Amino acid sequence: MVVSVPEKTLEHWASIYLTYRYRSKASLWWPAHGEDIYIGNLPPAPGKAVQLELKTTTLNKKGDVHKVKIDLDQLDRYLALPHWLQPFYVFPIAKWSGTLKDATAADGLPVSELGFSRSDHLTAMQWWFANWMVALPAARVGQVLHKELSAYQSLGKPTTADLVTFSFKNGVRSKPIWADGKPHRTIRWQSLWKRLEQCGAASWSQMVRLPTWVTSGRTTIRHTDLRPLLADSREDNVGELSTWGSTGDGVFVPVADSDDDGEGRPPAEANEETDHRIAVHLGPSALRLD
């Protein structure tokens, strides 16, 4: 199987982007395969945490068809988790035929340059990975692959499915073809972070850590209340923290310390070859809360 760009490369570029964008205001870590974000893994500070699952595109022999392939076993395990532990799938919207390395070489640009934004180099800016990476919540991926996922759950096969296909003819890309035949709007990579800085969509998977004095007496938190609560968390006196997880319907519920005992963890035999995740924690100073 030929890939357009290695998934490990996408992981590193994503990490570089987040490090440059947030500096010390964000914490990154790479969960072991088959492991979730647990409370014990979160930094001892207020903020929010999300997971990213990086995927690449695979090529046909001619290199003029790209497919984003999804491991259905992995997707099934993700969707079985509480909503707040489900990742965003992040993948390329391919704008080139063949491999990325060959495409940039034809443009006179080493592929290693694509991890950086070079404002003084127009060609590099056009090829910058942040301009062609997009995201979809795992729940949305499950909706697009509903038929394939149901067949996998019933029969144990197929084990992979094509989420979206990009075809090129004479160097021109056709419209994306999604697995369910419907059009779907993705979240552009840079827009994902701009929106997360403002607490994102009510349906997105997120974990939020807040001082207990901010959440005292609450049994739930509405998504619309997150920004003022996180703004209050910028005070110096943080104290004891509580963790809250999104349910996908605009409500956050407490995530108890007892949830850190492995409940909901995918099986240990989760495939390391297909697990390319980054966990990201954004502190209050990284968020636009005013």
Image (cartoon, grey):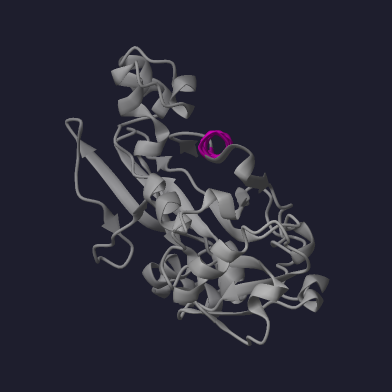
Task: Report whether 132 appears left or right of 168.
Answer: right
User: Relative to the observer, which residue lies in front, 51 or 27?
Assistant: 27
Extent of the magenta region: 7-21
Q: Is residue 98 above or below residue 82?
A: above
Query: Magenta includes 9?
Result: yes
What percent of the width, then of the height, locates residue 13? Answer: 53, 34
Q: Quadrant of residue 221?
A: bottom right
* Residue 203 vs residue 110, the one in the foreground: 203
Question: Residue at coordinates 33% horizontally, 63% vertically from top-left?
Answer: 179
Of residues 186 and 95, the one drawn nearer to the viewer in this rendering: 186
Q: Is residue 120 left or right of residue 197?
A: left
> Can you tell which quarter of the image residue 147 is in?
bottom left
Residue drawn at the location 61% of the way across and 44% of the way down: 25
Where residue 191 sits in the image (x, y, percent)? Answer: 37, 50
Q: Relative to the observer, which residue lies in front, 111 or 198?
A: 198
The quadrant of the rendering that contains the C terminus is bottom left
Please identify the dominant SS of the magenta region.
helix
Q: Residue furthest front?
A: 236
Left or right of 105? Residue 171 is left
Q: Is residue 275 above or below residue 104?
A: below
- Is residue 163 visible in this depiction of the protein? yes
